[in-house]
Amino acid sequence: MKSTTRISAGVLTGILLGFALSLSFGVFANKQENEAIPLEDLRAFTDVYMRIKRNYVDYVDDTTLLENAIRGMLSGLDPHSSYLTPRDFQDLQIGTSGEFGGLGLEVGMEDGFVKVISPIDDTPASRAGVRAGDLIIRLDDKPVKGMTLNEAVNEMRGPKGTDITLTIMREGADQPIRITLTRDTIRVRSVRSEMLEPGFAYVRISNFQSRTAQNLVEEINKLQREGNGLRGLILDLRNNPGGVLNGAVGVSDAFLEDGLIVYTEGRTADAQFRYQASPGDVLKGAPMVVLVNEGSASASEIVAGALQDHQRAVIMGTRTFGKGSVQTILPLRQDTALKLTTARYYTPEGRSIQAEGIEPDIKLERLQVSAAETDGSRPVTEASLQRHLQRQRATEEAGEQPADNGSLAQRDYQLYEALNLLKGLTILQARR
């Protein structure tokens, strides 16, 4: 009895005080708020702990009970604070480096179910049509209700080539949707780009890693060399769940000459940061359009908010996810760690993104455009009239090829509209 009480109380106090003190110290005054440890509450915890040890139907070892207590304490704070086991800690480090195993989903918890924040580009999940906002209610035949987020994530991971069936509730669907996915090694390509039309470039950032800003600048420089300069850029942050804070700061800095990018506020001095832009705009002032949606979260919202507040880009799409908190990884003993929410971040103008998101300058819902069905007749135009004048062919002889905007509109309507807006901004800039 005495030994068990010492173990439970000592570990619990270690949780509260950074594994540095024991109950033998009595009352410990918090340096910041001068609050004492609630000894009566700790005794209540010890009492519950001992009753479980004595009376639970199956034997449960001390490590399992105490880890569950830690997880429960953190899960009661907010959806993003958690206890990281050695495997979780390793997975987090692998994820920020850009390679991990699984289905390619960024997920959270909502009402006891796994909620898809966004599928990662070019992964089994994105190829199978999993969408941001989907609720996963079953993993194969196992109900998700009752699982922790880590348990659900571990269930979705597995050896490459093995299958798992997700049962999904989707807004607008009459009944659950079952999707079978084949697990694969997920190698996240953080930045990819293409030239939509001569002078108009498209850059997609799927998540923010430690090298994202550097890769972005490399891609834009490559596009500028290929296209003999850029007249405008579309930056696509749709379904980008976030990632490394410094990656978002670096991406914002690439387009800003000076000023504040983002700042954080928390209870401790270590949680107070202000990030300033350095001179140099990789686009040299060319117009920008940033695409966002409800799957754009965290670091994506930092970039969108900074460029919006500095009037450097037009934000187009739908309201973003609204994750405006900072998580700090605090390593503990035996390769475990604490992921703890330590601050909120704010846009340069002092807007809090938390639970609000970024409201786009131009709201544009996701639409599906298809070719209209006709009776085969064509509209009457000048070219339909007999003996019409033939057009001069100087444009074609000069080598210019008109873009196939019809196919772009059908493939990605929001991108199509962003390109049209970017052309308008370019025209206005030239006239000024």
Image (cartoon, helix red, strand yellow):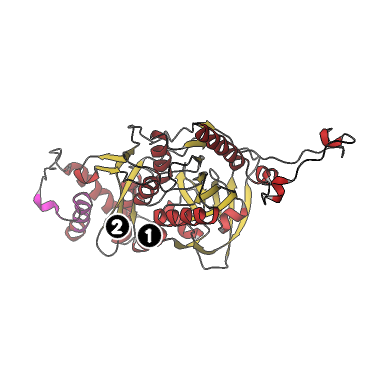
Marks 1 and 2 in Cβ contact (< 8 Å): yes
Assign a secondary structure to mark 1.
helix
Res 423 quadrant in image: top right
Q: Where is residue 265 in the image (x, y as percent from the top left)?
A: 26, 39
Three-letter amino acid code at disc 1? Asp
Q: Position of residue 196 (x, y in %)?
A: 60, 49
Q: Mark 1 points at which residue?
A: 88
**Picture quarter with the N terminus:** bottom left
Outermost residue toward the left in this view: 25
**Observer-nearest residue: 400 or 317?**
400
Task: Tell me which secondary structure the magenta stretch mostly adopts.
Answer: helix
Note whether 226 is above or below 197 in the view shown. below
Q: Distance between the residues labelled 1 and 2?
A: 9 Å
**Observer-nearest residue: 358 or 234?**
234
Asked if residue 396 is among those painted magenta in the image, a careful observer would answer: no
Left or right, 399 with reference to 147: right
Residue 337: which numbered mark, if any?
2
